Amino acid sequence: MKSGLLQRLGNPKDEKLRNQLYVFMVCLGISIFIWFLIVLSKKNMETIDFPIIYGKAPSNLTLTNTPDSLISIRLSSTGFEFINLKYLTRKKPIAIDLDDLNVQKEGSKHVAKLSTSEIEKRLIKEYRLSKELISVSPQVLHFEFASVISKKVPIKPNLHLGFEKQFQLSDSLILKLDSVFVIGANESIESIDVVHSEFIEITGINKSQEIIVGLVNPGNIEDVRISESETTVSLKVEKFTESTIELPITVNNKVGLEVKTFPEKIQLTYLVALDDYKRINTEMFLIGIDTTDNLRKVNKLKVKIIQYPSFIKITKIEPLEVEFLVLER
């Protein structure tokens, strides 16, 4: 059927049929257009949403609830005006400054209410809403605040450090700023005991350096802020060498007993910075044994490192346990 009609339209002898079809299509298009204009000219009811953004709360308060993010206005107007409002007009967010609210104290909370009637007037004026206004939702915006307090907490670096062979930290990490104040409502900050830095991974370290690290808002809680945004971490790095020292075991004998160990000395292997290598001597160490166990019920005693220089890193103790003999005096 369709192929027959197309063949007739393509036949030069059927020019009259083609002209009739073109006239029909034009008339159909005009009819649809007029119908569309009639529909758009009629009054309809539509809802238009306007987004809301909120400014900062008063300096001594923090917002604890989540107020409405949209104001919806239901209007009676023509389709032309609705198309213009909904699709052709850029709706700017409604800005509400929380610092301008009339905040009242109710028990332990601070509350405020804002009628949307003023916002409604502003929208009518700004968007020339000469239409029949049916309703506004919500009619009142509700706000809840809590008093702001602050607490000082330490900063904990979140670093993963990789060193070149023989290089190590020669001292603890030094933070230029080692603590900050967390500020917010009491219930939001009471469980916060530490503020972490952003995670940073550094490899191939072979010299001392300073790193600026950002601080992470604990728990990403919106109503909690921290007094500083970053700190500087100092790394003291030195080249280390390995060395071994032979040390005597010191025994604190109990009354009436004398304990002899076998062997009487241990071998202690450690890492030390090259600059500190010559400082090491046996008097810096104190090696003992753990005599807390009942000496008659054990065969060996654990070796205890009681004292050693803070600038070395012990890597091996040999032996870890020693045999012993108890002599009565």
Image (spheres, helix red, strand yellow):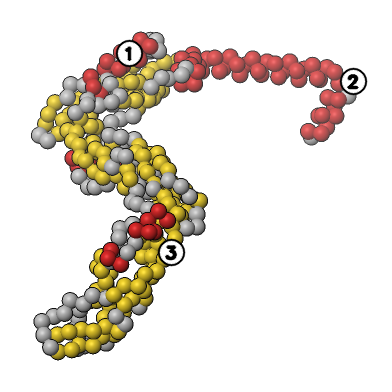
Q: Is residue 233 above or below residue 68?
A: below
For the residue marked with disc 3, what is the amino acid? Glu
- Residue 292 or residue 55, whichever sits in front: 292
- Residue at the image point whose x is 52% and y is 15% from the top: 38
Q: Which residue is mark 1?
A: 122
Q: Which residue is mark 2?
A: 13
Q: Label for residue 242?
A: 3
- Residue 82 or residue 20, whichever sits in front: 82
Viewer can see residue 271: yes
For the residue marked with disc 1, what is the amino acid? Arg
Residue 116 spot, x, y in % from top left = 27, 20
Q: Is residue 125 above or below residue 149?
A: above
Residue 236 spot, x, y in % from top left = 39, 48
Residue 112 spot, x, y in % from top left = 19, 26
Q: Is residue 277 left or right of residue 283?
A: right
Q: Secondary structure at mark 2?
A: helix
Near mark 2 (Cα within 10 A), the count class, few <14, some 14-19 or many ≥20, is few
Q: Is residue 305 above or below residue 278?
A: below
Q: In this rendering, which labeled residue sits more in front, label 2 or label 1?
A: 1
- Residue at the image point whose x is 40% and y is 13% from the top: 127
